[in-house]
Amino acid sequence: MSDPSSQPRIFLVVVDDTEEMRVALRYAALRARHTGGKVALLYVIEPSDLQQWIAVESLMREERREEAETLLQKLSSEIADLCGGLPIIYIREGRRRDELLALLEEEPSISILVLAAGTGAEGPGPLVTHLVGKMSGKMRVPITVVPGSLTDAQIAVLS
């Protein structure tokens, strides 16, 4: 069996459409570069409320998957530029929080979860609130919460 300390650290970022996600992504990519690690991206396609119309739901799911793949290709290119390697990609369907927790249980190679806190009046975001609050003592990996308002220069200094 290989020594776990010789394995590269894998920094997992949950991809969504928020501005702060880009901060988490940049931080994770630079940390990976500086530590010889890798970045992993999780994109969760959440179910719509049109479950009763199977044909419409199927078409919408297909469109959301295509959008996810397009976004992940773009982000993969950005990550490769920042840390020199392509990320590991996970695309799942379900509720974001549930799929994240399931992935962390299934993939022992993931070392650190990197999230960015929202900067709006509504708080840090539901995922950060849940994981850092109720789940923090039960998590298998450390959680790094990056302030969503950091600039690229500030991220460079921290990573």
Image (spheres, rainbow, N blue to C red):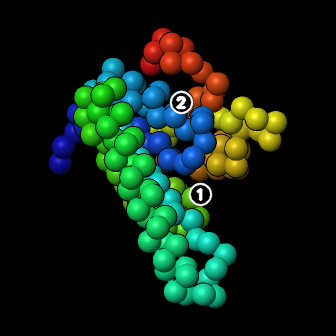
- Residue 23: image tag: 2
Which picture quadrant has residue 91? bottom left
Give x and y (percent) for residue 135: 64, 50
In the image, residue 88 above or below residue 69:
above
Callout in the foreground (1, 2): 2
Closest to the observer, 90 or 7: 90
Residue at mark 1 to residue at mark 2: CA–CA distance: 20 Å
In the image, residue 3 above or below residue 100:
above
Q: Residue at x 54, y 68 (%)?
A: 94
Give x and y (percent) for residue 106: 39, 60
Give x and y (percent) for residue 111: 40, 40
Q: Is residue 158 visible?
A: no
Which picture quadrant has residue 144? top right
Q: Are marks 1 and 2 in contact (CB under 8 Å)?
A: no
Disc 1 element: helix
Label 1 crowd (10 A; few <14 / some 14-19 / many >=20): some
Q: Residue at x 60, y 42 (%)?
A: 18
Q: Residue at x 63, y 88 (%)?
A: 52
- Residue 97: image tag: 1
